[in-house]
Structures are given as C-alpha cells and as structure tokens.
Image (spheres, grey):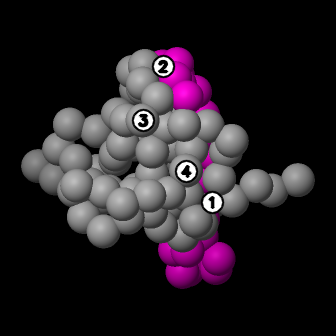
Amino acid sequence: MYDPLPKCVTIRSSNIHGLGLFATEDIPEGTELGMSHFYWGERLERTPLGGFYNHSDNPNVVKIRKDSRFFLVTTRDISGGEEITCKYTFYEVE
C-alpha cells in the first residue's frame, strides 16, 4: 500500500522556506524514505514526499532513479527533529 509519507517523517514549518519535511525519529544512513517523483508519460509529477522537502547545497538525502520513479535515500544519519533536505535539480551542472 502507498503511504504519502513514511512514519519517520512529518511536515512542519521550516526555517529554510515555508513548510518542510522533518524526521520524527532518528533515521539511519541508507534508508529509502519513499517515492518523491515519477514520470506520467512525458510529465514529471511530485508525490507529497517530493513536494515538501526544501533545497540545500549540503543535503542529507539524494534522489535515486528506478525506472520512471525517483526515491529519496538518506546519505547520512538524520537525527529526530532535523529537516530533511535535497538538491532540487534533476540534472548535472558542469
């Protein structure tokens, strides 16, 4: 069954911008949080998980592509209460 947010994540007010995703408990490095985006035909769509994370140049999650879907995976341990951030880009900047 699809859950819009994993149990270890909530949405609340962010110091970065508007609302953001926050860990409700400690999350270990390498944890897949869920699907953030997917292609519907040629169109890229966001899930609630993909719609609420804020950008950081030093993010604690990355987007990993699996077929037409993108998943957020932690790149380090995240502490409970910490904001979950990712780079907004879907391409490499040289």
- Residue found 36% across the figure and 42% down from its top: 83
The answer to which of marks 3 and 1 sits earlier in the sequence is 1
Q: Nearer the viewer, residue 84 or 86?
A: 84
Q: For residue 62, what is the image quadrant?
A: top left
Q: CA distance from mark 3 to mark 1?
A: 31 Å
**Residue 91 image point, x, y percent:** 30, 56
Residue range in magenta is 25-45
The answer to which of marks 3 and 4 sits earlier in the sequence is 4
The amino acid type of the residue labelled 3 equals: Gly
Question: Which residue position holds label 3?
Answer: 81
Q: Nearer the viewer, residue 88 or 23?
A: 23
Contact flag, marks 2 and 3 (Cβ < 8 Å):
no
The amino acid type of the residue labelled 4 equals: Thr
- Mark 1 is surrounded, within 10 Å at the Cα level, by few (under 14), some (14 to 19) or many (20 or more) other residues, namely few
Contact flag, marks 3 and 4 (Cβ < 8 Å):
no
Question: Which residue position holds label 1?
Answer: 68
Q: CA distance from mark 2 to mark 4?
A: 18 Å
Is residue 67 visible in the rendered image? The answer is no
Is residue 76 visible in the rendered image? The answer is yes
Question: Which residue position holds label 2?
Answer: 29
Question: Which residue position holds label 4?
Answer: 10
Which type of secondary structure does the marked residue at label 3 adopt?
loop
Q: CA distance from mark 2 to mark 3?
A: 16 Å
